[in-house]
Amino acid sequence: MATEGGKSFARRDKLLEIESKVRAWWDEKDVFKAEPAENHLNQVKNSLGTFRHAFSLSKLEFAAAYHRLRGANVLLPFAFHCTGMPIKASADKLAREIQQFGNPPTFPHEVVEEEPNPKEESDPNEGDNVVPDKFKGKKSKAASKSSGQMFQWEIMRSFGLSDSEISKFQNPYEWLKFFPPLAVEDLKAFGLGCDWRRSFVTTDMNPFFDSFVQWQMRKLKSLGKIVKDMRYTIYSPLDGQPCADHDRATGEGVQPQEYTIIKMEVVSPFPAKMRVLEGKKVFLAAATLRPETMYGQTNCWVLPDGKYGAFEINDTDVFILTERAALNLAYQKLSRVPEKPTCLVELTGYDLIGLPVKSPLSFNEIIYALPMLTILTDKGTGIVTSVPSDAPDDYMALQDLKAKPAFRAKFGVKDEWVLPFEIVSIIDIPEYGDRAAEKVCLDLRIKSQNEKDKLAEAKRLVYLRGFTEGTMIVGEYAGRRVQEAKPLLRTKLIETGQAIIYSEPEKKVMSRSGDECVVALTDQWYITYGEPEWKKLSEECLSNMNLYSDETRHGFEHTLGWLNQWACSRSFGLGTRIPWDEEFLVESLSDSTIYMAYYTVAHLLQNGDIADLVQPAQMTDEVWEFLFCGGSYPKSSNIPAATLNKMKQEFEYWYPVWKGPYPEPFDICIYNHTAIMSKDHWPRGFRCNGHIMLNSEKMSKSTGNFRTLRQAIEEFSADATRFSLADAGDGVDDANFVFETANTAILRLTKEIAWMEEILAAESSLRTGPPSTYADRVFENEINIAVKMTEKNYRDYMFREALKTGFYDLQTARDEYRFSCGSGGMNRDLVWRFMDVQTRLITPVCPHYAEFVWRELLKKDGFVIKAGWPSAGSPDLKLKSANICRIPLAPVTSLSEDKLKGLIYVNEKFEGWQAECLQILQSKFDSNARTFASDGEIMKALQESTVGQAADFKKIQKQCMPFLRFKKDEAIKIGVQALDLKLPFGEIDVLKENLDLIKRQLGLEEVEVLSFTDSDASAKAGTHASLLNQNPPSPGNPTAIFLPSDGVLKASKRTDYISVD
């Protein structure tokens, strides 16, 4: 028995032992091998994508396992997408460490251990210790004091590699040989139902896949979908290539933000610190998004403490701006030395205050650089234009300088640089006039430039209105709308050399190599996403897809709306060479948009029966066209016709329908399918999910809140891990893997095995014959409900709900049935049916457990993973309603006598104000949509009813409102029957049939069920009849009064409920 800290993990180890045994059974029969069936039309196909995370993978696995269980012919493949820069970057990093520190390297630090968090989770092993919930890792002192990153050599050691093995990983292709087999072992341990014959790695290491990608690229180019162009793109200087979303450590989704740099020429003579610039044209380079407002400039702004520099743009021009902005310009071909900004002199904002400049379009011939304390130097250039007529920030900053002599003196600002300059009206905005900034600041009572929240609100109010409704009142475009004049003025400024285009990332972007990205103007190959006709086809495809949620659909539609030219070439990393320009590699997303098609033939090309018959060179474009695009038979090919037809059959069989969770860029996948394949082969559905947290915290190696799949399996077992993944969540919001849930799964699964073993050992004691009692009928109905509800939940990819209805609820029904049967015992046939059904329903989530129960305990033939969905009759809703009948025990005296008598009073029909409320709700309910009219309309009907006209309505109203709310919620949940005046079953009959259960639950000697409307029955309560008026029964809510056998009441009060199922 495994122990840790002196305590055993017997329950977990039992599951691990079961899992090992079951996987051997599966391997022996190759149960996940997927071949085309003869009867094509009767099959359900799932051709599904690869996944990088166990959570996303689990959604795919559960869906595939559900369809396999139902009898579908399921293909679940898994491959390794190695294209891109991460592996190459890691290999190069390792090589640099060896070069710098030796082989094996001697690093200049000690290695210290991080202590694990001692917090423990609940114990599934009856008091046994649980592994701490924090990952125990090593980090060097040097690393912890710097970037926090470990040396690559240390990372490799953490994988269990010896120093003698590590150096070979300087070759990036060694990574592709070493790590995929380890991942396969982990995924097999997870129980992934994968056809591993179809597994492959990408990049040119796989010549067949390499040929497949080259064919795609040539086809897109022949269709005019790939062009070479100059474009602004997020770029990693360290990697020397564009940095797409998947190459980024932070900044996913960030796009280039385009500005107009206004060239404000500094007037000579220059101050002493800038005399090195004499003979050059020197400009303060101010980045703006609103070039149309330049007519209203009164000054420009600099950050006093900001760090600036004078950077050479070409042989004659010098821009004063921040170094960050200069670096972006250098990659946009605006630096004397390409990609390397050259600074002639370093400056601070204090050096710039008071500089006189001539600025384009300004009505003031000379304006001055003045201090502003709120400038951000991580956006724009650090130089800001000032238009106080239309910019609230500019207005308040200028007013502060004008009104506060001490403020001017603090920064050495002379009066003549500020006081003579008045607001210049340039744009008229409805409701705000031609001095919008001044008006909005007065309206919001803003007193200072430091009131950031109010100023943000002021900008929100005037900027959008100014653009959409403002009219120019000055300049050559006076009388035209701002949105018309803006592009015209911008073009003129650029064409006349008074401004330039400048771009930078919208937000900070860090590459996986660790450098901050810039925006570069690059000449490279692009795929023309966004082209109108192509976009129209993609929108058609999307409109016919099942996306499982409106939120997902809106996200797709939004992305299709903005997605345009996509850089598809890279100069660094692993992958496939651009076939017509081998200097470049195919970018790592561009080679993985229709790769699902390759799964259908991978096993035949790489390791199948025909693998020796086909060479990569034989896979010509003509062959790929024949296989995947309905092309004509490749007569020039020397591949045997039978081989070609076999591959084509595989594709045609598996590919028409595929759906599932899929993490790659969906919209790019849609685009490429619509360009390359026929409509019959367009994707039919995507199921998306969010990220996953561990114990409600972000998963992070640096904090220790981290698990690999292997670690989770070793700590919890595969099935308990899968159980917790299913329970983590199903929507697009972030899910939460809770260790407590995994530990609970260990306990519940092992206890269920023990219960079944106990039941089977004592099978002869079970009641035989057909189900006959009320408890039998209720339990049988609960099984039917579980089958139907769980089927729907699996079908809708709602796996947490499937776990609830197919396991939790079903076990609760079993436990209640066991109690309800009492001494009469459970029915043998029902117990066997329960064990069969529960085993099948949990199979997609916990297949090892289910397979063990199926074969070892239930002694069934075959494999449960292919056993078929359990059959079930239609649920009896009346019986379900009766089953949830609960008896509230009225607040009466609780007695100490051993022998008690219970009087249960039932009212089978709503009467009085309750009946009136229900009739109103019936008239205001749309049974198809399950919606009600407005609360106001319902209240009006209530006020006009006989109840509303009664003299004591105000008193009754206090009871009506909660009753109306309760019944509305119930009707929305279960339908219009919730508004019936009577229950769909005889309540008195149900209670009488369950008298023995009621006696046992309440410990009563005698129980009598009575009608509340029977005056003779009420008399039996004697002096306690008043309690019935205080707590009158209603349909589904009987009232009980307990009396001692001698009829004498004693001591304290109590309130309780019983269930009659």
Image (tube, grey):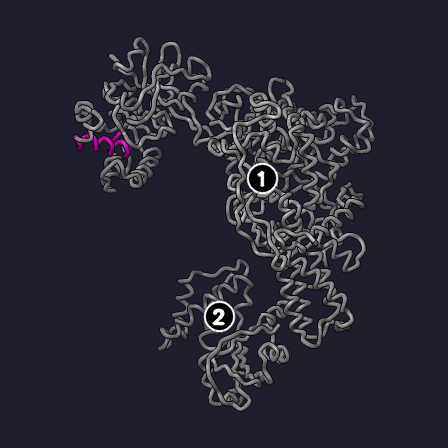
Query: Label 1 sits on what residue type?
Result: Leu
Q: Is residue 389 magenta?
A: yes
Q: Is residue 431 magenta?
A: no
Residue drawn at x 67%, y 61% as measured from the top left: 751
Residue drawn at x 64%, y 32% as measured from the top left: 81
Residue 319, position in %: x, y? Answer: 35, 17
Residue density around tag 2, few if under 14, some if 14–19, many if 20 or more, within 10 Å? many
Residue drawn at x 69%, y 26% as measured from the top left: 205
In front of the other: 811 or 39: 811
Residue 663, position in %: x, y? Answer: 59, 39
Please tell me in which quadrant of the rendered image residue 758 appears. Answer: bottom right
- Magenta stretch? 387-405
Q: Is residue 418 left or right of residue 902?
A: left
Q: Is residue 128 left or right of residue 829?
A: left
Could you say whether the residue bearing mark 2 is in a helix, strand or loop?
Answer: helix
In front of the other: 606 or 794: 606
Q: Earlier in the sequence, mark 2 or mark 1?
A: 1
Q: Is residue 668 left or right of residue 467?
A: right
Q: Is residue 197 visible?
A: yes
User: Are circles 2 and 1 on residues that touch, CB within 8 Å?
Assistant: no
Residue drawn at x 65%, y 35% as measured from the top left: 160
Residue at the disc numbered 1 = 542
Query: Label 2 sits on what residue type?
Result: Leu
Residue at the disc numbered 2 = 918
Could you say whether the residue bearing mark 1 is in a helix, strand or loop?
Answer: helix
In front of the other: 59 or 217: 59
